[in-house]
Image (tube, rainbow, N blue to C red):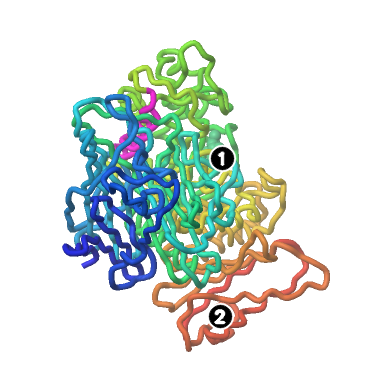
Amino acid sequence: MSIIFDEVKKTFTLHTKGSTYQMQVDRFGFLLHLYYGRRTEGCMEYLLTFADRGFSGNPYDAGQERAYSMDVLPQELPSQGTGDYRSPAVIVKNGDGSYGCDFRYRGYRILEGKYCIPGLPAVYGDGEEAQTLEIDLEDKVSGVQVTLLYGVLPQLDIITRSGRVINGGSGKIYLEKAQAACLDWVSGDYDLMSFYGRHAMERTVQRTAAAHGAQVISSRRGTSSHQYNPMMILAQRETTEDAGSCYAMSFVYSGGFKGEVERDQYNQTRALLGLSDELFSYPLEPGETFHIPEVVLSYSSQGLARLSQNLHICFRSHLCRGKYRDSIRPVLLNSWEASYFDFDGESIYRLAEQAAELGMEMLVLDDGWFGKRDDDNSGLGDWYVNEKKLGMPLSRLIEKINGLGLKFGIWFEPEAVNEDSDLYRNHPDWAFTVPGRGPVRARNQLILDFSRREVVDYIYEKMCGILDQGNIEYVKWDMNRSLADCYSRQTPDQGRVQYDYMLGLYDFLERLLQRYPNLLLEGCSGGGGRFDAGMLYYAPQIWCSDNSDALDRLSIQYGTSFGYPVSAVGAHVSAVPNHQTGRVTPLSTRAVVAMAGTFGYELDPRKLSEEEKQAIREQIGRYKRHASLIGNGLYYRLSDPLSQEIGAWEFVSEDGSEILVNAVMLEIHGNMTVNYLRLKGLPEGCLYRQEESGMVYGSDALMETGIPLPVEMGEYHAYQMHLERV
Ligand code: GLA
């Protein structure tokens, strides 16, 4: 049993394989947080301390008791208005205009299986894999109720948190803040690891001390964003890859978010994650319910590698869905960096011919095939095939490509519209604009109001109209700007629009997958601007970055690996000099780096030499031989490419029988010192034979001293070693 309620102590204890989470209903009915950390027995109520805390507020029912203060106590759902002056998870504006809610315990239910959230993505698990705890809280005065949801997946060391807010009162209320997860630590020194970036340089790791003064990571862009990822790690100061306590918080949502970490006046640490509260003021009429998007929590007592693996396994097998969840994705050739907007049906067919000749499995026709779209200034919204440009119907092109033995995939950007489009000319009010103001343009495009059903329905029908024209097995779903001017003509309550937009988007994606259950969706947002757990529920892979430079990709993929599995990382081999950086790296290095992802190509094979073509055939063969190990193996970071001379990582099969080791030399110097690659996660006391060299190594020595990497002239050499247990 992973969820236990103790009637006497009024504690709820959630156990996973390696962690315990405990909370308690106290004498006033507050739901206090007691403990989250390594698995333990017992009741941790002794961790609550009570001392007169000067100017901290005391709840009315505590009478004259000054030592009882919500400003100090660890809580499950800190809400504004109880005398806790730290950042709250929930702010309610009541029907009478007053702010504040004081939630007290009402009851609980333990259910088999993991809860779902209507209209929103969420981790799933059946009765064998998961349990759900629902805890009802209520504010007596306003009648507002919250049901907290805890999903426990014991084998995965995962606990999820979400909630339902129900307006049980008689007046309209506004939710001004609604965050799914609060973690309060009464002791300990923590570091916050967050993942910042920019377009073409996403998810750079930053580790800073959780300090006095809130640290906020957030997106007010309506997408999870390039700038901050909706995922945080709180690690004890001494925690490393291989040892120490750490916690992950990952938001299963693709819109604006806010993560806050603050060390308070008593050196306690609070971390919150959930919806952004800016431009958020969600109306609830009496009887209406609001669903708070979920946060996935994980705890590891064995360092960051294990923490990441917990998330990888959970997302791979309990968040991603569909045919491609477990199967190996096709090796694709994407037309974007090969031809940008400059193509016709014949030239795409010739790309496909080359792709087939090299052993690739799918041709993806990127942007430019629809409406009037010869650059990125027009055409978005006009989802009809530009047959004049293609020189043939789409169905004909697909048949020809299928005839080569290749699958066919295609690009869409359903949420966007250009002012220079028939759609905008006919329905200018469907785009987000503020009446009387010129809209903010980005990439010369606007965003459609997906909070409106008729807009979603229209684009959905148009998209299906294209997908029904032939055997389309893959869609790249792009989204190339941040939201702005989020004014919807349909509602007087503009504070609901960004959330409703996400509901519209998720509804679209869900309908699409119901209608085309075998479709492979790849998410994209100017590369990795919407790389989050929410998207993974619909798209098992996401284009990781518009930057396809192998060296930059090392740090982008390194950062991404903290929170997301390799099976989610869209990665391609592109041409040199690289189109984003101008850097030249060896073809073999580009392949090794792209193999830490879904693997594909994004170049014009006609420009390659015979030697390069042969190398590509071999790369594809090698990838396919190891695809299952790469996709399903345990992933270990072997170096930090932001500070070390090498970028290195490793895949270990779950039974330890094989390993794929990868390393890229980032720096070259005169009279070079030797880099030893120390492996991780191997079973002790066994021998491994390296396929390429025939060398036999002891697993303990591999982990203790490592394999010396060659000292070789030239920049950015890569090494990939496959080892099997003897
Ligand atoms: C975005 C994507 C690219 C490509 C272009 C097409 O930038 O990230 O991969 O699809 O759009 O316009």
Which residue extends farthest bottom?
Answer: 685
Residue type at tag 2: Met
Residue type at tag 1: Trp
Question: Which is nearer the N-term, disc 1 or disc 2?
Answer: 1
What residue sits right under mark 1 in the picture? 336
74 or 588: nearer the viewer: 74
Q: Is residue 585 magenta?
A: no
CB at disc 1 and ligand 1 closer than 8 Å: yes
Q: x, y percentage for residue 90?
A: 35, 40
Q: Residue 73 appears in which quarter of the rendering?
A: bottom left
Q: What's the mark number on residue 703? A: 2
Q: Which residue is drawn at 44% across and 41% down?
A: 257
Predominant SS along the magenta part? helix
Q: Is residue 358 visible?
A: no
Q: Give the range drawn in magenta.
A: 494-512
Q: x, y percentage for residue 11?
A: 24, 61
Q: Quadrant of ligand 1?
A: top right
Q: Is residue 286 left or right of residue 352?
A: left
Which residue extends farthest top?
Answer: 436
Q: Is mark 2 on a helix, strand or loop?
A: helix
Classify the position of the N terminus by image quarter.
bottom left
147 or 679: nearer the viewer: 147
Measured Cα–Cα span from mark 1 to mark 2: 41 Å
User: Is mark 1 in CB contact (under 8 Å) with mark 2?
Assistant: no
Q: What element carries label 1?
A: helix
Which residue extends farthest front?
Answer: 64
Q: Which residue is drawn at 34% across and 18% down?
A: 492
Q: In this view, does 256 lie above or below 447?
A: below
Q: In this view, does 717 lie above or below 517?
A: below
Label 2: how many residues lie within 10 Å, few (<14), some (14-19) or many (20+)?
some
